Each structure stands twice: as C-alpha cells, then as structure tokens.
Image (cartoon, rainbow, N blue to C red):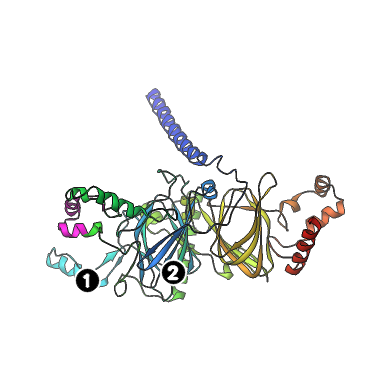
Amino acid sequence: MAKIILVSFSLCLIVLFNGCLGINVGLRRQQQRHFGECNLDRLNALEPTNRVEAEAGQIESWDHNDQQFQCAGVAVIRRTIEPNGLLLPQYSNAPELIYIERGRGITGVLFPGCPETFEDPQQQSQQGQRQGQGQSQRSEQDRHQKIRHFREGDIIALPAGVAHWCYNDGDSPVVTVSLLHTNNYANQLDENPRHFYLAGNPDDEHQRQGQQQFGQRRRQQQHSHGEQGEQEQQGEGNNVFSGFDAEFLADAFNVDVDTARRLQSNQDKRRNIVKVEGRLQVVRPERSRQEWERQERQERESEQERERQRRQGGRGRDVNGFEETICSLRLRENICSRSRADIYTEQVGRINTVNSNTLPVLRWLQLSAERGDLQREGLYVPHWNLNAHSVVYAIRGRARVQVVDDNGNTVFDDELRQGQVLTIPQNFAVAKRAESEGFEWVAFKTNDNAQISPLAGRTSAIRALPDDVLANAFQISREEARRLKYNRQETTLVRSSRSSSERKRRSESEGRAEA
C-alpha cells in the first residue's frame, strides 16, 4: 500500500514539474521573441501612420512594425469618439491598457460566464408575476452585465480576448490612447495586433498609411470571384459573424435567416464607430460624481482586503471564487488626481502611478502606467526603468528628452510634443525637462510593478554610493563627491537650476566655438 502511495505521489510530482516546466518554457519563448530587436542606435518621436474615418469618430494607429515598438512588443492606437458615438463591441489578441485623455462615457466589459447583474426592475416584477401564474412568456425588458463609467484621467485594464464596447454620453469628444502588449504571454497568435469585432463592417485599425484597407481588399477579392451563390458571399463583412453561413447563425440564435444576415453587416458603411439613434438606452444606476467616487473608493478598499487575505493564505468568508475574482473585478483607476500623487514637488510637478498593488488586475495583464505633469522648467531627473520598457505618450505641451543606451550613446535628444509617442527600452537612461508651456504625459510600462532608479536626488544610486567610491570612480575630490551626493535634496522631480535663456546662450556660444 505504501509503495502504491509513493508511486502515485511521484507521478504527481512528475506531472506538476513538467507542467511548470512547460509554462516556464512558454514564457521564455515569449520573452525571447524580441531579444536582439532592441539594438537601437536611434529613437524617434513617432506620429500616427494610419487613420480610419468612421461615422462617429476616428481611429489613428502607429506603425507597430517600427523597430521601437518591435523592441517593446507593443502597439499603440488612439480613438476619438464623438458625442453619442458608440465604439462597436470588440476584443483583441493582447492585453490592453486604455488611458482616457479627454471626455467621459460608459463602457461594458463582457466576461464570459458572469451573471447579468444590471436589469430593469420591471423585469423582476413581471418575472415574479409570471412565475406565480405558471406562465413561460419571455420578458422584453433589458438585462446585461455591469456598466462602468469612465472619465478623463482613468486607466482601464482589459485582458486579452475579453470583449468590450464604449459609448460617449457627454457633450465633447472622448479621446483614448491604448497600448496593446502583443508580446504578452496571453497572446498565443503572432506579434500583429488584431481586433475582432462582434458587429459592424470595420476597417483594419493597424494598416500602414498608403496601404489599401484590409476590409476593402477583402471586398474586392470577394467581388473578383464573381456571383457564386450565397455560400461564396460569406466573409464580405469584417466582423466575426461575417464568415459564417447565415443559416448556421439562424440555427445557433434561433432566429430567422434575415436577422442572421443583419449580424454579418455586409452592407454597413459606418465602420468602427457608429452614431447612436437618439440616446443609448442601457440599465444603469443614476449617481452623482461624488457617489461614483465613493463607490470607487469602497471597491478599492474591498479589493485590497481580498488581496491581503490572498497573500496571507486565508480564504476569508465563503464566496464564489469565479464571481469574486472575475465578475466583480475592478478594471478602472484614475491617475489624474493631484491629491493622490505618488511623487510631488511643489511648483515643479507630480507623478501618479498605477500598478498591481493599486489595481490588482494588472498582475494578470503584466502592465502598469505612470501619469506625469511637469511645470515650466521642471526636470524629471535622469533615471532608468529597472524591469520594464516604457512607452511614453505626450498628452500636452513639450519637453526636451534625452535617452542614453548601454554604450553611453545618445539615442534620442529632441523635443517630445503633444500627440507623439516615444519608446524607452528597459534600462536605457532617460531625462525630461518641460519647456515653457509645461509637459504632461502618460507612460505605459510592460511590467505590473514597474520600478525606476534615479541617478540624481535624495533616493538616487549616486546618493547611495560611498564618498570614496565616487571620488575614485570620477577622479574628483571627496568634497566634490559630497556636493554631487547632497546638492539635490528632492527625490525625482526638481526645478532646473539654469533658465532657458541661460541654456540658449550657452548652446549658442558652444556652437560658435565649434565653428
């Protein structure tokens, strides 16, 4: 008996070991796909290369084949949704972080298997009456999954393969900037960003400028085949239903064939963002901004308590694990609030961060973000990202940015302006200094707990070194070493010690000397 138990236990260990080894090998392969692609001798501040004009907005994307994005394994996209515009339901092959640059609205994130917790109260009473009468009539009232509100400064986290939609219920355009982490372990396809639409006849969002749109190519290819019957007409649209046979869909949904054909949207010209007729009617609680913020705070505290119990190994009260960890998952965090800044220097600027400690779903996505605001002449001291690539999107203003690689070469020394994107590879040193109008940015990072190491200031690597190490390393006196360590008492954000006019005069004199 003991031998049987021992053999069984050994087999379990072998299976467990092989399973863990398989996961680790898969992760290593995913990470190694981009090894050798970060040998960058020059970085560039990039503009969007492709634009899709839709009925109620536009979608702009950066060339994901650019070497900088290939290094980080990411793609970047910017969407503008006009008032009363609806971004059609879709999902992607990679985890996505969305930053709300401007505007407000609502979104639905569709987790499979989760209950429809938002419903019309009339439906409940009608159902109760029908059950009491023993009737089996269908309700015509609405019922759906949770609706989430968003506003300027929010970060929204979307796992790979999870469908979502967005609606602008405000009076001004909603502008969102999204990062898709195509090199994430959750993406089992290739490195191309892909959006799978559940409705409409959308254009491909990631085509290079000048290339024929994917949807148009497909329609032309279908037309070139000629009139070959309904079965050959499948796939004229660009949503996931377009390729199915209409009768197959009718059978699956238990509807008539004409309705099934409407799902395929073959003749829909509105593209990815459509105008809603009237106003979008959904079931949602009407609450003030203060009430939404109070609910957000309560959800955050509840989530932190569950996370604390998980780390301590305690289960707490008996719950449905699936609903507690998935269906009620908090997906949104605002990183624009001054009162919640993680780093703040008066009259210089602030930095807000969101990571897996403040938004636990990011542990699943392996992503985090940073929102910065520098006032005029504000300086973000030289630093490096310990464990992540950083993809910086300029929200407002301008900044002089310098980036240095492992060979001490300057790979970027230029302005980063509103609407541009700059990728800073892991461990490359970087510094930012705001110009006259200040500078605001959001940085997406490819680690759920991204960390930086400053090169100057109170918490810097230089400050941590002994005086004699500095004196011998830089061939300076101990006095100079102490000044190097202690002249800056701030941590990360400082005011430039030289005015822009002084820097201009110095650069002009250096230019004359070189001439």
Q: What secondary structure is found at the residue carrying circle 1?
A: helix
Q: Earlier in the sequence, mark 1 or mark 2?
A: 1
| Residue 148: quadrant of the picture | bottom left
Amino acid type, callout 2: Val
On screen, residue 238 versus residue 353, left or right, reads: left
Query: How far across and how far down the image is residue 7, in percent?
Result: 40, 25
On screen, residue 218 versus residue 168, left or right, reads: left
Amino acid type, callout 1: Ser
| Discs 1, 2 touching: Cβ within 8 Å | no
Q: What secondary structure is found at the residue carrying circle 2?
A: strand
Front-lying residue, 230 or 309: 230
Could you tell me which quadrant the N terminus lies in?
A: top left
Which residue was labeled with disc 2?
174
Could you tell me which quadrant the C terminus lies in?
A: bottom right
| Residue 119: quadrant of the picture | bottom left
Which tag is nearer the camera, tag 1 or tag 2? 2
Front-lying residue, 459 or 153: 153
Gap in angstroms between the C-alphas marked 1 and 2: 37 Å
Is 410 a magenta residue? no
Decide: few, some or many residues near mark 1? Use Cα within 10 Å; few <14, some 14-19, many ≥20.
Answer: few
Please state the extent of the stretch shown in magenta in the rendering.
242-261
Decide: few, some or many residues near mark 2? Use Cα within 10 Å; few <14, some 14-19, many ≥20.
Answer: many
Is 243 a magenta residue? yes
Query: How far across and how far down the image is residue 126, in percent?
Result: 19, 70
Query: Relative to residue 275, is residue 216 depicted above or below?
Result: above
Query: How far across and how far down the image is residue 344, in percent?
Result: 64, 66
Question: Is any atom of residue 387 visible in this view?
Answer: yes
Which residue was labeled with disc 1?
125
Query: Relative to residue 80, is residue 229 depicted above or below?
Result: above
Front-lying residue, 237 or 130: 237
Q: Which mark is residue 187?
A: none
